[in-house]
Image: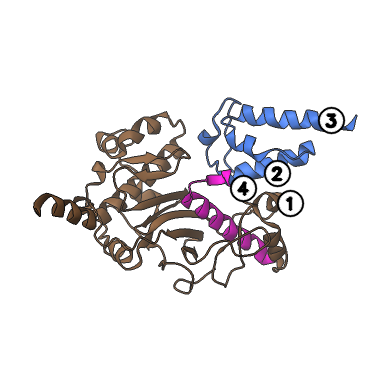
Amino acid sequence: MDVWEVDLDTMVDELPVWDSVYLLRLLTVLEEDTGRALPMRLILEARTLEQIRTHAAGAWRTSVGGER
Amino acid sequence: MTAPGNSTVGPPLRDPVEVLGREDTWDRVRTDLAECGSVLLCARLEDWAPQKSDGPELRQLLGRDWSRYLDIAHPEIRLRYAASRTLLKYAAGAVLHGDPEELELSYGPTGRPYLRGCDQIDISLSHTENLLLVGLTTLGLIGVDAELADRQLYSKGMGRHVCTPYELVTLANLPESDRNAGLVRLWTLKEAYSKAIGQGMQFRFTEFGFGPDGKPVRVHRPDGTPGTGAEWAFRTFLLPSGYCVSAAVFDAGFGRTFDTRLITMLDAETVEAVNAELYEGP
């Protein structure tokens, strides 16, 4: 498997082999990790990895907060 | 997969025409479009890769897409971008009897591509791995999509984002070894339909679905009841090269456009009416 190093500001449509299947797979993995349903609309609208990370981190914080 | 020719719903659609290069004859492409109103073309990436990645020929061909092409950083993505648009413009040029370099590819508000000034034909484009896929129709709308048939999609959590409740049950009833192929088929059908209606993934894939393989294919509501009628045709093909290809065609009901040539693109009845007004005095 080829591996590329990219930074968080990379546009998602600039990622090699990136497509909508990978987008959904990433969404699924993030939901499993955070334990929260992520709004697909926000993930679809995210242009960069940083924007996806921000949405996932927000869901994680909400998840942790919800347990307190 | 649904075998070519056995769909009983919607306009006809034949299996994809493999186009080997720019010098191909395009005869079957023109024939399928004339006889069915729609045609699918497939090609290998290497057969349509530009000879020079920054030459004037490519710049001329890409037209307004040239600046976008230059902005693409990764060479593989640039290659796909150029090859797919080259195939699309040559295919459209063949059926419109026009110069591919004269055709201008534009994009709607949701990114849906269309040929500017060529309302007589609708287009759709897909590429994955080594496959390029183009759909053309004179009936109304078309959307196409392709995936490797053995791409692993069926996994924990994925179905919840892709399938309606009815589809989840239908997939679960398949033998385990058939579930991934079933989901790839559903995925390409949903992508094709979403592209045809210009929504992409903004129209959640869990909000509409398709029935099991082997029956006439329609869009279903989440509970499995039919949502579209005979105005839509959906077809899925399994290519010898290992790709699963789906297409969605909408017949707008305005009749067939038999003469797609650029020079005769004016509507015949409109021309007749104008001529009658201009030249037939009281």
Closer-to-camera residue (B20/B199): B199
Which chain is home to disc 4?
B
Query: Which residue corresponds to mark 3?
Result: A64
- Same chain check for tags 1 and 2: no
Task: Check the residue under mark 2 and report the chain it is in.
Answer: A
Say which residue label 4 marks.
B204
Are labels 2 and 4 on one chain?
no
Q: Are marks 4 and 3 on the same chain?
A: no
Q: Position of residue B41 (x, y in %)?
A: 38, 58
Q: Name the kind of residue labelled 4 in the image.
A: Arg
Type of colouring: by chain
> What residue range appears in magenta?
B177-203
The type of residue carrying mark 1 is Lys
Residue pictured at 55% horizontal, 43% vertical: A19
Q: CA distance from mark 1 to mark 2?
A: 8 Å
| Residue marked by disc 1 | B156
- Please give the name of the residue rendered at 54% of the width and 30% of the height, measured from the top-left corner: A11
Residue B135 vertical placement versus B199 (above, below): below
Asked if residue B190 is among those painted magenta in the image, a careful observer would answer yes
Among the 4 quarters of the image, the one containing residue B29: bottom left
Give the colour chain B carries in the figure. brown
The lab-note entry on whether marks 2 and 3 share a chain reads yes
Which element carries disc 1, helix, strand or loop?
A: loop
| Label 1 to label 3: alpha-carbon separation | 23 Å
| Label 3: chain letter | A
Label 2's element?
helix
Q: Is residue B250 magenta?
A: no
